[in-house]
Image (cartoon, rainbow, N blue to C red):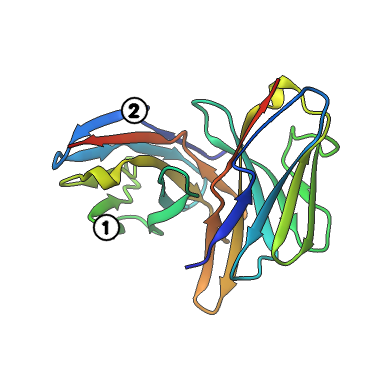
Amino acid sequence: GNSVTQMEGPVTLSEEAFLTINCTYTATGYPSLFWYVQYPGEGLQLLLKATKADDKGSNKGFEATYRKETTSFHLEKGSVQVSDSAVYFCALANSGGYQKVTFGTGTKLQVIP
Amino acid sequence: GAVVSQHPSRVICKSGTSVKIECRSLDFQATTMFWYRQFPKQSLMLMATSNEGSKATYEQGVEKDKFLINHASLTLSTLTVTSAHPEDSSFYICSARERSGLGEKLFFGSGTQLSVL
């Protein structure tokens, strides 16, 4: 079955540091890949997505590239801010819509001034 | 953007009691909503798919008599944990699917932390 593995947190970084959160997946077929973010007290929000191999999703300075050869979708940001402190979830869904979304365990990011 | 409201955000109850969690889509109609559960340091696990006007579809291993789902309107789905026990303590989160001419999107509630004493 489908599975998503992401690095355990928490991750603590200083402001303006480089961020990488690793995510690898196992899936049949050609899934769509997502990163969701959950800010304190709020619901999960879609941060970015990629629907096919070599696609790069980007939003708010975050990027992730769909790497089929390494089954990875690592999240990166060149310079984090305190406001980026949140929990980040990597996820995948098989083609055909949102019937079955498989999530990783989430990685908590804390950015300190 | 579309918002999903989930209440309560936190609930503490005694063992044997029932707890109801509400999930509302505030500015769109959601024919399909999803309920997830997350144990500490584990993934969000899909429990069931809630379809407006019909019975929910439960994932394997989820007891339908224990986790009652009602989706009586296009904007409201409820999850009732019946006769809750300490092992039901978990983080529950709902999501609602919006379909439009621009495609399909999934919006999440902020979750409910259930603690059963």
Residue at position x 54%, y 79% in the image: B101
Q: Nearer the viewer, residue B26 or A93?
A: B26
Return the residue found at the far bottom.
B101
Residue at position x 24%, y 37% in the image: A111
Q: Nearer the viewer, residue B29 or B32?
A: B29
Amino acid residing under circle 2: Pro
Q: Which residue is mark 1?
A: A60
**Mark-to-mark CA distance, 2 and 1:** 21 Å
Residue at position x 21%, y 33% in the image: A13
Q: Which residue is mark 2?
A: A10
Q: Nearer the viewer, residue A13 or A46?
A: A13
Q: Chain of mark 1?
A: A
Q: Chain of mark 2?
A: A
Amino acid residing under circle 1: Lys
**Percent x, y of residue B46:** 63, 42
Q: Looking at the rendering, which quadrant does residue B91 occupy?
A: top right
Secondary structure category for the residue under label 1: loop
Secondary structure category for the residue under label 2: loop
Q: Is residue B6 visible?
A: yes
Give the mark nearer the N terminus: 2 vs 1: 2
Q: Are marks 2 and 1 on the same chain?
A: yes
**Percent x, y of residue B59:** 72, 41
A34 vs A75, left or right, is: right
Q: Residues within 10 Å of mark 2 (few under 14, many from 20)?
A: few
A18 over B84 or under it: above or below: below
Q: Residues within 10 Å of mark 1 (few under 14, many from 20)?
A: few
